[in-house]
Amino acid sequence: MTQMNQAMIEKYRSSFLKEVETNVEEGHWVKMCMQCGVCSGSCPLGPHWEHPPQEIFMMIRANKRDEVLKSSSMWFCTSCYNCIARCPRGLPITHIMHGLASYSKKLGLAPKSQPTESFGQIFWNSIASNGRVNELKIGLALQFKDGFGQGVKNAMAQKDLGMAMMKTKRMNPMEFFGGHTCKDKSGIARMLKKAQEVEDQHIANYGAGK
Amino acid sequence: MADMKIGAYICKGCGIAERLDTKSLVSVATRDGKAAIGREHDFLCNADGVAMIQQDIDGEGVNRVVIVGCSRRAKTEAFSFEGVTLSRANLREGVIWVRPDTDEARETTQEMAEDYVRMACAEAKFLKVPESSGEQGLLRRIMVVGGGVSGMTAALEAAKAGYEVVLVEKAGQLGGVAAQMYKRVPAKNGRQGPVDPEVEKMVHAIESLPSIKVHLNTTVAKTSGAPGRFKVELATESGSSSEAEVGAIVQATGFVPYDINKLPELGGGKSPDVVDQLGFEMLAKAANGGPIKRPSDGKEVGNVVFVQCAGQRSEAPGHLPYCSGHCCTTSIKQAMYVKAAGGDATVLFDDLRTPGATGEDFYRAGQEAGVTFSKGQVSSVEVAGGEVKVSFKDLILNEEAVDNADMVVLATGMVPMSGPDPYLMLDLESARGQNDTARVADLEAQLEGGFPSVLNLDYRQGTDVPHLKHGFTDSHFICFPYESRRTGVYTAGPVRRPMDMAQAMEDATGAALKAIQACENAALGRAAHPRSGDLSFPKFRMEGCTQCKRCTVECPFGAINEDEKRYPLFNEARCRRCGTCMGACPVRVISFENYSVETVGQQLKAVDMPDEFSEKPRLLVLACENDAYPALDMAGMTHQEYSAYVRVIPVRCLGSVNTIWITDALNSGYDGVMLMGCQKGDNYQCHFVKGSEMAHYRMSKIDDTLSQLNLEKERVQTFEVSITDIERIPKIINDMAELIGQIGMSPFKF
Ligand code: SF4
Ligand code: SF4
Ligand code: SF4
């Protein structure tokens, strides 16, 4: 992964904007931002972002590669689509945020133990191995992601909620042992494998541009 | 009209008869108003009512018609009769609609109506039917000064409309700034990027038209006369001169770029590689699509930084405080030249402004072409080692940044190429005459760096078209932007306000059409805006004139010169018929046939004045007919109530208010006088530019009169109102009525 990062640094030394345009989903839109700030003002989580979208776009244009890719900002996007609905220039901001997040993860630059990023990984692991989400295991994995001690504390804090969910049959403790899978688990696995191949190929092609 | 015969016609429609005793209105008209004929009609503005009046005109010899019904602003087409004067008593909008329909109010409402009937009849006695003076014939030729895109457009448009054109250009060729351009921002479809300016095409079209006579290397040495009969003397560089007669003038003298040397902090004048937009345009034209070479060493430019708002939109001394409007799109255009030639271009802006229908699309075209746009404030531009270092604060990222460029382009502003402000020149002359050295120095400083006279007008009020601010020529921005303060002279393009090429062409087209209109109007003796079509003009009873010069000085339009004996010399076609001169004249020798010291003075005296102990005060409102009076009508239409003690007289402009009216009103027992006119000052809305200001000034001197009469100074007040003050004006009136209630009745009731 860092090898790929190195390759990209070499390739796009002078222009991070070009790198984003080539490698990031919807990245070719970044140059069209007119810096009005409507997106940042519209984002319900905007005040908590290190760099709200308008700023991210400016940073890309100012060649601030590391700051952007290592930032936690785009991981804050909750896909509420407020910004897309309001951007006067029609930028697909939400998609660009996710594009930047996944690109930074691919390059191994995503911030460590960023909660959204961890959740994404846990979710992915669950769905990729079973073909469906095991809510009990996802919940536990999230609670215990910061170690056993913290996990117990988290679990105790939420025990009433857990009991209530079990009582109303919203959660089944037996799911802990294996749990449901989908009908054609191996089919799912083959599908994901194929998708991975396509993406690997795409990454291998990054160098050639699009 | 030796034998005057008044016919008064009282309408009973629109609810008037339900609210008022119209029978007694008829007898007021015949008894107090001395109307020979007084008639009621159920529906006066219908065909039958109008026919009844016409019959009296034709059969009974009625020559002064008094319509008692709706506002003078309503039913103007129905009530228009040839060869007779017309007065209107406004009982609908001005009485029944502003008074409550209650038993207690009935008496005062009737009194109000009766007074308006008396006033209209009194006015009728002093009106005459205006006639055209026939002062000038029709001259279908205009002069256009300036051969740039604006001037060429005006010339072509006038020629297309069948007019002859005298086109005067001080340079040796046509085209102006546009001729130096490589490409222009398109007028349509901004997405297509820069397009050919097509100046040669225009020049060619002009040269091929025999109706356009082009004078190159020529300036205007003298302009005298008036619309319809201007005489101009043209002087060529070589010293020869010629004369021309024209009906109207379009001044399209354009602009010069702000002097870049005044911006050393932005590198101006420090290196040939720091240029203004026009400088860069010429480099691009020379490169003609190839790589642009920089002036210092001929290196092909790889990276160009454009600095927006250079020395403009800035309050710093010597800078231009305004936005020139075109320079953002111009920089985008030039940055696109650089991109097209394979270089990099960055536009550093604070606010990127892309006005016009295509502006936004053009901006997108620039972004798509890969121009970098950064919101940044440039702190310095330094030249070192073959590079130009631009230091700026990135306003989005809130940090200092540096860009090393091959060249820097400063987006400086437009400085209008207007002649000197005539009023400053006149002030200077008088300050010199009075040896007021401080004032002389101040005025000289204000005039410094200005341009020589463009028109050399042989007018009492100076050589050129007056300015509004920053050297741009004055025009009524909202209502009639083309009319300058010299009738028949229309300024167009960047000399009027900063603008881009598309706007300048539109502006010039408008100016050409206004110039044509001025010629046609002058031939018919009709006024230009805002009293367009008016045939009346001020007449001077010269034997009474004391040569005080107030009229020549105060006429906002420079209509009055002085003759050899120093008497006012009036020029009808220059006049806008505002009456400011009439308001100014201390001996009251100026009047219009249908508007005079008498027509108003007699109205206010015709009001029936209740005695001091009646508890019925009387308030006189002199309301500007352009805004205040329509607002009062609209107050009626929306049924706002105001005091029944008020009597309103519309005036052409507050400037026409002669202080004698105020004195007369106070002497006849009015308890208060209110003047309502348009906004004055730099952001004036006054339709005659200076009328409202003059009125405020004159009224500030009325305190003497008041103290002589031993009256409180609150009794006379002047207000700035606008046409939208439909609720405010009734409130002002009611507040005044209340105030009078507090200070008490005037003792001057006889
Ligand atoms: S709303 Fe759109 S144009 Fe405005 S700053 Fe955000 S992305 Fe840029
Ligand atoms: S058009 Fe642009 S550069 Fe020019 S003054 Fe206005 S904002 Fe500044
Ligand atoms: S009416 Fe107005 S424009 Fe005409 S001469 Fe008098 S002041 Fe000037």
Image (spheres, coloured by chain):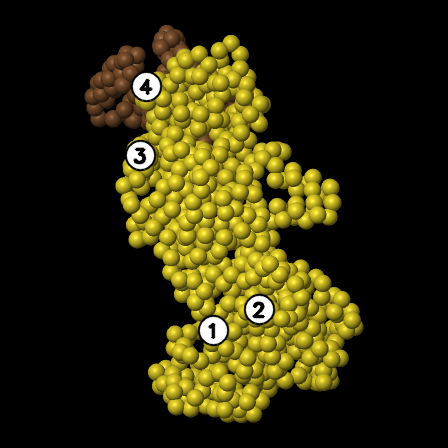
Chain colours: A brown, B yellow
The residue sitting at 63% across, 80% down in the picture is B605
Q: Secondary structure at mark 4?
A: loop
| Towards the viewer: B386 or A86 | B386
Q: Nearer the viewer, mark 1 or mark 2?
A: 2
| Residue labelled with disc 4 | B290
Amino acid type at circle 3 is Glu
Asked if the residue under mark 4 is in contact with the one under mark 2, i.e. CB atoms within 8 Å, the reply is no
| Residue labelled with disc 1 | B130
Q: Nearer the viewer, mark 2 or mark 4?
A: 2
The local crowd at label 2, few if under 14, some if 14 to 19, many if 20 or more residues have their Cα within 10 Å, is some
Q: Secondary structure at mark 1?
A: loop
Residue A78 seen in the current view: no
The local crowd at label 1, few if under 14, some if 14 to 19, many if 20 or more residues have their Cα within 10 Å, is some
Earlier residue among tags 1 and 3:
1
Q: Nearer the viewer, mark 3 or mark 2?
A: 2
| Chain under disc 4 | B
| Residue labelled with disc 2 | B540
Asked if the residue under mark 3 is in contact with the one under mark 4, i.e. CB atoms within 8 Å, the reply is no
| Residue labelled with disc 3 | B200
The local crowd at label 4, few if under 14, some if 14 to 19, many if 20 or more residues have their Cα within 10 Å, is some
Q: Position of residue B307 (x, y in %)?
A: 49, 26
Q: Nearer the viewer, mark 4 or mark 3?
A: 3
| Quadrant of the image occupied by residue B671 | bottom right
Amino acid type at circle 4 is Gly
The residue sitting at 30% across, 40% down in the picture is B207
Q: Position of residue B670 (x, y in %)?
A: 68, 77
4 and 3 marks on the same chain? yes
